[in-house]
Image: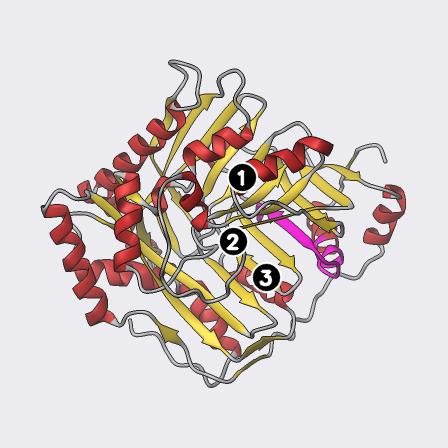
Amino acid sequence: MDSIYLNNYKDFAAKAKSYASQFQPCAILDSCEIKPQLDKGNYKLVIGYSGKKLKVSEVNQIDSLYSVWEKNKSWIFGVLGYNLKNEIEKLSSDNTNCFGWPNLSFFSPETVITVNWNDELKILGVNSDTIFNTINNFKAFQEFDNTINCGSILNSDFNSEGHKDIILEIKDEIINGNVYELNFCSRFLYEKISLKNPYQLYEELIKISPAPFSCYLSLGNKYVLSASPERYLKKDDTSLISQPIKGTRPRGKTIAEDETFQMDLESNLKDRAENVMIVDLVRNDMARIAKAGSVKVEELFGLYSYSHVHQLVSTVSSLLSENNTWCDAIKATFPMGSMTGAPKIASMKWIEKFEMSNREWYSGGFGYIDPNGNMDFNVLIRSIFYDSHIQKLAYYAGGAITIDSECEQEYHEMIVKAEAMNYLLTKHIKNMGSLEA
């Protein structure tokens, strides 16, 4: 099918996402019609569905994925789990797993649907005209029945006192010079839980918490429902861009309060210090595979507002040096520095000590690689992870700890970041335990 321009993007997008969600596997990269920072985006919507899971080796998985992709150079969609750090650096992860999912999981779809920011639609695959007509006549889900059966209450890694104790321990390590910023996260876990329709729950999540790098993924029994505001890494020809987030404030209940939170975030020295540390880390990571002199900070401390939070977002760009590929770019920069701390390797080691739970896919990346080797991956934060076979659901939240961190403020920031997910699940599970705020 030749590309066409949509007259009503909202209507088509709702139908296309609902239609694709019926298939396994299915991947949806959803901008929620929020343009990325500095308009660094190619697509408003990308969908891939049906197809087959890619087989990669259990060692050197990123290299293996590249070899598999290189044979056919087709679209692939999937997840880079946080623990891929262990094959990039000499690290380990011994904390308790929730799901036991593989560190890397990708599939090659039978059908790919893209819509750019000019509302130009392309459908790639067999019988694309028929697919277009089917989608146009499809009745998108309107009534959400998101009843959730749950046999146990919410189980969190830390209460406020336990969280405070860990923050103080982290600050001791900062004082001792072992690390100067560390991203510390907690897991919130439900067991014996059954979602009637994960996709419809995703739609409700992005309705209450729209974000420019939202995504939905179903891979058999594995589901990701994400309202991520953060881009990990985008490659367009030889151009690379990464957009780390550091610095968060809640949205105000009034216009005046909202503006106060914005001004406080924009001027706060601690938040700006957190942000610039990670920007330096990202610059250093990029420099390993970039053309000399091409690494630039295009925006520092950009203030962006989302449904539940204000955040400071910076933009780092570079040009990929000759003979380097998307595989090299990932190995040089993964995982995103905003989710580790600095120095990066030291921070990842300390994270394993202070966090109780294995991150698994959380704080990794979800995205696509196209036939030309272009790619776009988010950071898997503000995300719900669900396994329908073992009936477990988890989400995580956290923040960067520096010498200036205040324990109560850090705990409150974690709760704010989890607010949309907690609200959504509280709404549908009557016997759920409540978060301590």
Q: Which residues are magenta?
A: 17-32
Mark 3 closeness class: few <14, some 14–19, many ≥20 residues within 10 Å: many
| Residue 406 x/y as whole percent | 16, 56
| Residue 61 x/y as whole percent | 54, 42
Nearer mark to the viewer, of 1 and 2: 1
- Asked whether residue 259 is in view, the answer is no
Q: Quadrant of residue 145?
A: bottom right
Q: In the visual, does 222 lie left or right of 309?
A: right
Residue 391, numbered label:
none
> Which residue position is annotated with label 2?
210
Nearer mark to the viewer, of 3 and 2: 3
Mark 1 closeness class: few <14, some 14–19, many ≥20 residues within 10 Å: many
* Of pointers 3 and 1, the one earlier in the residue sequence: 1
Cα separation between marks 3 and 1 = 21 Å
Queried whether the magenta region covers residue 30, the answer comes back as yes
Residue at figure coordinates x 13%, y 42% from the top left: 177
Residue 129 to residue 26: above or below: above
> Which residue position is annotated with label 3?
223
Residue 62, numbered label:
1
* Of pointers 1 and 2, the one earlier in the residue sequence: 1
